[in-house]
Amino acid sequence: MEIKRKKTREINLGKIKIGGSNPITVQSMIKNRIENIAAVRNEAIALQECGCEIIRLAIPDIESVKHLKDLLSLKIFKVPVVADIQFDPDLAIESLNAGIECIRINPGNIGSEQKIINIIREAKKHDAAIRIGVNSGSLNKKFLKNSGGSALEAIVNSTLHSVRLFENNKFYNFKISAKASSVMDTISAYRILSSKINYPLHIGVTEAGPAFTGAIKSSVGMGILLSMGIGDTVRVSLTDDSTLEVKAAYAILSSLGLRKYGVDIISCPACGRTSTDLKSAVEEIGNFTAGLSGNFKIAVMGCIVNGPGEAKDADIGIAYGKKKAAIFIKGKVVKRIEIEKALEEFKKELNNIII
Ligand code: SF4
């Protein structure tokens, strides 16, 4: 089954396009403080090396804009940069002047509409994009009151209000995120918005948590939306290394057939039939193939009896027996090797067909 994506309006973030029939883009946010230029530089390089396509930076004060300019002058960003200013319109305008491709604002925090209009005017001047980032934790009180206290209704109404404001000011180069505190409310908010507007949606589960549980929560929330065709750009938020966010995002997208990311390693959970350290074998093969791109599926299975058959759709695989391991291609065993030499031999076979 193929997912039918909702076709949204195409917008530009510098050199890349979001929405329309463009691939769903993966983004992340720099975790180092912007004044730590060397650390931010290294993090930005690592993010881009692992496939991050949009990088967001927190700009908490006017000093940060100076650091932003220093960073941009290093020419390390090969992908669009988003400045996250949350509520200070002056920071938005200064960041746009510094040359970033997109600004993220939270309309509920900005204050008067005139301040938002000023940011729109500046974004137009610089041909930049804006992300309207509505968040349940910072909703304008007026919307909460008018929605009878329903955060979900307030999120939707606040977002639609901002959309109308942007359209009334003839600005269409924007995308939207609308995040509630619970996964289910976030899903509902995006479903409603997707049925009412045609602008690209940035999806993610906010404050998802540490890597393990955060990746699960994000997979559930984003997976449901993506399977309904909703979402044009994604960020997995984890309290962990930002490159893990990128890897998790690609894992979610590739499991739904929406993007491809490196080789696909599948492995069985192992059970009482295995007599090998399967976890270490999977890690070693993962390290060996890290960074490779290509449409390949590699299987690592814990027993010969079930392994090759269960993983017959893999391009190549290894299944461990008691004394020997079988290397198989498309389910057919092509070699049997003593356990001690099996991984080395398997890597040679991988070199032959993948590298
Ligand atoms: S492939 Fe073999 S070892 Fe792995 S879970 Fe299945 S039966 Fe157990």
Image: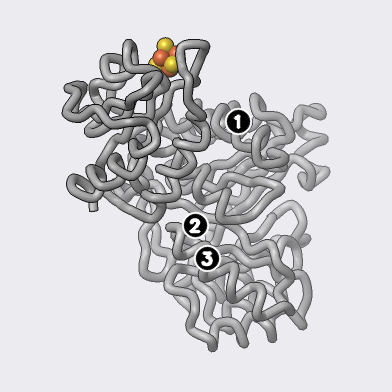
Residue under label 3: 46
C-alpha distance separating marks 1 and 2: 29 Å
Q: Nearer the viewer, residue 259 or 244?
A: 244
Given this view, does label 1 or label 3 mark the residue nearer the observer? 3
Task: Give the quadrant of ligand 1.
Answer: top left
Q: Which of the 4 quarters of the picture holds residue 165?
A: bottom right
Q: Alpha-carbon neighbours of circle 1 within 10 Å: few (<14), some, or many (≥20)?
A: some
Q: Amino acid at mark 1?
A: Ile
Disc nearer the start of the sequence (1/2): 2
> In the image, is 177 to the left or to the right of 253?
right
The number of callouts visible is 3
Q: Mark 1 — residue?
A: 216
Q: What residue did someone put label 2 on?
A: 174
**Label 3, label 2: how many angstroms apart (C-alpha)?**
27 Å
Residue 67: image quadrant is: bottom right
Q: Earlier in the sequence, mark 3 or mark 2?
A: 3
Percent across and percent down for residue 136 are: 74, 40
- Decide if ligand 1 comes within 8 Å of the CB at mark 3: no
Q: What residue is at 42 percent from the left and 27 percent from the top?
A: 267
Query: Which of these two is toward me, 260 or 332?
Result: 332
Closer mark to the observer between disc 1 and disc 2? 1
Q: Judge left or right: residue 61 versus residue 10.
A: right
Residue positioned 35% across, 48% down in the render: 262
Secondary element under disc 1, as helix, strand or loop, is helix
**Mark before the other along the chain sequence, 1 or 3:** 3
The reply to whether residue 258 is in sight is no
Image spot of residue 117 (x, y percent): 62, 67
